Amino acid sequence: MNEGWGPELWRFALVLIVSLMIGWATGSMALCLFVGTLLYLVWHFTMMARYERWLSRDVLTEPPVSGGLWGELYHHVYRFRVLARKRERKITELLGRFQTSASVLPDAVLVLAADGTIEWMNEAATRWLGLRSPMDIGQRVENLIRTPGFVRFLDARVYREPLVIPSPVSDDGMLLVHIVPYGQDQRLMVARDITRMHKLEIMRRDFVANATHELSTPLTVISGYVETLATRYADDPEFSAPLQQIRQQSERMRRLVEDLLLLSRLEMQRGPSVNGTVNVPAVIDSVVAAARAISGDRGHEFEVDVDRHLYLRGSEQQLYSSFANLLNNAVQYTPDKGHIVLRWYADDRGAHFVVRDNGIGIAAKDIPRLTERFYRVDAGRSREVGGTGLGLAIVKHVLKSHEADLRIESTLGEGSAFACDFPLKNIVPQAKSA
């Protein structure tokens, strides 16, 4: 039992004893007990009023001197209030350090409430976002930064990837926006100026596009002459083998140029590739036919499970390129007589194109880098099978333009699974015939 209860019980017992003694002496036992109990309650109400006045003070003061249960109550509450004040000072100090540190950062930093109102911003927010402090504090950030892509990004509340938006204060400026949820539904928004990097990226894309375009013409001429020479000297052992090698390498170069041109077009594309309704089952039929031709006499077993009534909004050419790259990779990296499964289906999360094989598999450390341009897990084997190193980079960009995601699962020596996950809103279901 708490130490304060002992004196309090003794005090109550003393009131009862005195009341009984006076009642016995006066012959009014009930009245004395009532008066004694009433006085005891009045004393407690007086202590409660004093306790309330002490709690309501803005300044923390020493508690009034009291004994018994009220003394213990004052002691515990005072101790908790002292600890709370210490925590408050510590939090205030940490918040001050954060604001001081964030205020000198070169990037714009904003603290957003659950409803998107600005609770705090640093000085760089004025420079990069055109915001003003303190006038814009308490305003909803989407009312101040009206870029449509930013508003959708903020409302989606899915911040796995950053967003690139035009600068609100510069015609040619670009910003990279990160949003990190924290605390009680608050969000930390960081905007970084990437104008220089963006211009360099555009220069790189233009260079690659122009270079590959210029290469295509002489490559076509070389391929034409090689075909002519190969036909003329087909029976000449001195020339047939070198000409065959030249033809193979020129074909490899042609595929590389085509992939670079396609990748450049995808990178320069703005917005989703929702050009029309795509008969995905027909596209898959073409992809599988081409894959069987590539497999040839290697004897791969193809298991195809396709929902014939499941169409998509998108670009038929891009989807064909993406699906063909995934299936061709499965053929190239699966041993002879291997098993390749292809599925096209929908569930409550969206539509899914899945290619699964029992091939050589991929090490876990290599999976995050597979969609990088020219990244090869085994450069020697990739050259042997004639890969350009751009296939999965193309797949990544095609899926991005279709608002889809690429999932990769693989175990070294056991096989791999590549899945393209399309959102529900892009599905165009077809009526099933009776």
Image: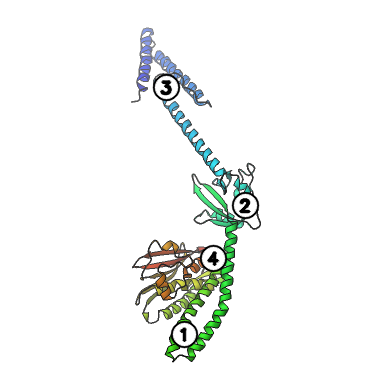
| Mark 4 vs mark 3, CA separation in Å | 70 Å
Q: Which mark is residue 145?
A: 2
* Residue type indicated by callout 2: Ile
Task: Relative to 169, say whether 374 is above or below.
Answer: below
Q: Which residue is mark 4?
A: 401
Circle 2 or circle 1, nearest the eye: 1
Label 1 element class: helix
Q: Which residue is mark 3?
A: 70
* Residue type indicated by callout 4: Ser
Q: Nearer the viewer, residue 24 or 361?
A: 361
Label 3 element class: helix
Q: Nearer the viewer, residue 164 or 264?
A: 264
Q: Which residue is mark 1?
A: 243
The residue most toward the top is: 25
Please report the residue visible at 47 percent of the width from the left and 82 percent of the height from the top: 246
Q: Is residue 18 visible?
A: yes
| Mark 1 vs mark 3, CA separation in Å | 104 Å
Task: Relative to 383, say whether 231 is above or below.
Answer: below
Q: Which mark is residue 114?
A: none
Residue 137: image location, x then y, percent: 61, 43
- Give the colour scheme of this rendering: rainbow
Q: Are marks 4 and 3 in contact (CB under 8 Å)?
A: no
Residue 213: image location, x then y, percent: 58, 74
| Mark 2 vs mark 1, CA separation in Å | 61 Å
Q: Nearer the viewer, residue 278 or 224?
A: 224
